[in-house]
Image: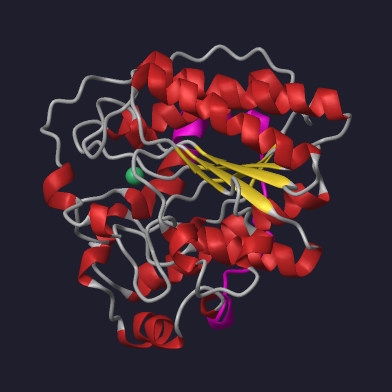
């Protein structure tokens, strides 16, 4: 059993105010919107805010990206067109905080495996070494895991249940030395490209592989990223009904609980948000993430919290083709 409270690695610097940018996605405001939603639902009593960590500096981004790309971003406000984000000094600053949040959450979980750590971050898994893409300015997973590997020798695995394939880790394999030691080459980037029951079956099959790697001490921590855009009413993806989406959370947390019980030790577990796109009702996105967090609190942290998922049917059209035009080429 995990500790009753979840440390949340949240600093207001992670978010842009919504009026500070123009663009399709609400992702730059997501950390703040998420924490405000939890507050509105009287759920903050189960979290402990951790804000005693600094943002990344320039050298951290060089870990997973070319100097040219990083310097263009921070010094010249130059981004790739496919990033789909309007650059501003405030946006650049928020990126430094958002990326650091994931690292400090993983670091804390490795040091305190009895505590599930929460990073309310989202925009990491589409960047590659030379460019940002699809709302993701940098490869946050790769940077965080390389730093944790360099510090502790720990190897991680990401369960990435976003609606889109997370290409950052795969695209960094040739660029980042030692990445295979920092993120498992066997099961370090679990993504499920299926729908409904087949999705659930493939998730379970992947967890069996992960189980073996953990039991044989080749994977030392798990980062679970339950993107809300794998939900069928999301604007940019659609794979799972509400019940199926929540079932994925149950499957993952039950997997962790049972595995910890069978091996007799705690497995560091970190939660991150990833995608979710509902311009008609952003509360649907926040409610799915909240359901995931409550499922974790109930299965792993000894609570019995009652929370009703509030997801409304989408009233806008699917936008995948126009917003994510080159996804298959990443
Ligand atoms: Zn996505």
The mark total stands at 0
Q: Name the quadrant of the C terminus.
A: bottom left
Q: Which of 177 and 68 is in front in this view?
A: 177
Does residue 85 appear in this view? no
Camera-nearest residue between 110 and 239: 239
The x, y position of residue 80, in whole percent, is 26, 73
Which quadrant of the structure image shows residue 133? bottom left
Q: Position of residue 328 (x, y in %)?
A: 25, 53
Asked if the stretch drawn in magenta spans residue 85, the answer is no
Q: Which colour scheme is used?
A: secondary structure
In the picture, the quarter occupied by the N terminus is top right
Ligand 1 position by quadrant = top left
Please say whether residue 117 is visible from this viewpoint.
yes
Q: Does 304 sit above or below residue 203?
A: above
In depth, the one of 54 and 254 nearer the eye is 254
Residue 57 among magenta residues: yes
| Residues drawn in magenta | 35-60
- Which residue is found at the position 36% from the left and 67% from the top? 91
Place residue 146 in its image quadrant: bottom right
Q: What residue is rendered at 37% in x and 43% in y? A: 275
277 to the left or right of 165: left
* Residue drawn at x 20%, y 70% as measured from the top left: 81
Residue 134 place in picture, x, y as percent: 29, 57
**Vertical placement of residue 87 versus 209, above or below:** below
Image side of residue 272 versus residue 50, left or right: left
Left or right of 115 in this view: 118: left
Q: Which residue lies furthest to the right in this view?
A: 264
The spot of residue 272 in percent (x, y) is 53, 44
User: Could you tell me which residue is drawn at 75 percent across and 48 percent down?
Assistant: 220
């Amino acid at each position: 059993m995990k500790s009753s409270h979840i440390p949340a690695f949240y600093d207001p610097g992670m978010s842009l105010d919504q009026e500070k940018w123009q663009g399709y996605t609400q992702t730059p405001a997501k950390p703040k919107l998420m924490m405000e939603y939890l507050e509105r639902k009287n759920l903050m009593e189960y979290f402990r805010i951790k804000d005693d960590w600094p943002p990344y500096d320039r050298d951290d981004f060089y870990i997973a990206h070319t100097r040219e790309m990083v310097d263009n971003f921070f010094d010249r406000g130059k981004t790739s067109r496919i990033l789909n984000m309007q650059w501003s000094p405030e946006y650049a600053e928020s990126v430094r905080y958002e990326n650091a949040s994931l690292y400090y959450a993983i670091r804390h979980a490795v040091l305190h495996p009895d505590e599930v750590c929460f990073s309310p971050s989202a925009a990491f898994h589409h960047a590659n070494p030379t460019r940002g893409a699809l709302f993701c300015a940098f490869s946050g997973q790769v940077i965080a895991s390389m730093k944790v590997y360099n510090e502790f020798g720990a190897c991680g695995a990401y369960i990435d249940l976003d609606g889109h394939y997370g290409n950052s880790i795969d695209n960094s394999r040739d660029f980042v030395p030692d990445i295979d030691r920092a993120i498992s080459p066997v099961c370090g980037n679990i993504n499920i490209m299926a729908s409904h029951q087949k999705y659930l079956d493939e998730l379970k099959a992947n967890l069996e592989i992960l189980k073996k790697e953990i039991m044989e001490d080749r994977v030392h921590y798990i980062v679970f990223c339950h993107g809300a855009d794998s939900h069928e009413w999301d604007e940019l993806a659609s794979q799972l009904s509400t019940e199926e989406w929540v079932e994925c959370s149950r499957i993952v947390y039950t997997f962790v609980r049972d595995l910890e019980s069978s091996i007799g030790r705690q497995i560091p577990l970190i939660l991150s948000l990833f995608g979710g796109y509902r311009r008609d009702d952003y509360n649907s996105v926040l409610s799915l993430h909240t359901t995931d967090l409550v499922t974790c609190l109930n299965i792993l942290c000894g609570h019995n919290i009652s929370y009703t998922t509030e997801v409304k049917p989408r009233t806008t059209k699917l936008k995948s083709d126009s917003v994510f035009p080159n996804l298959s080429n990443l």
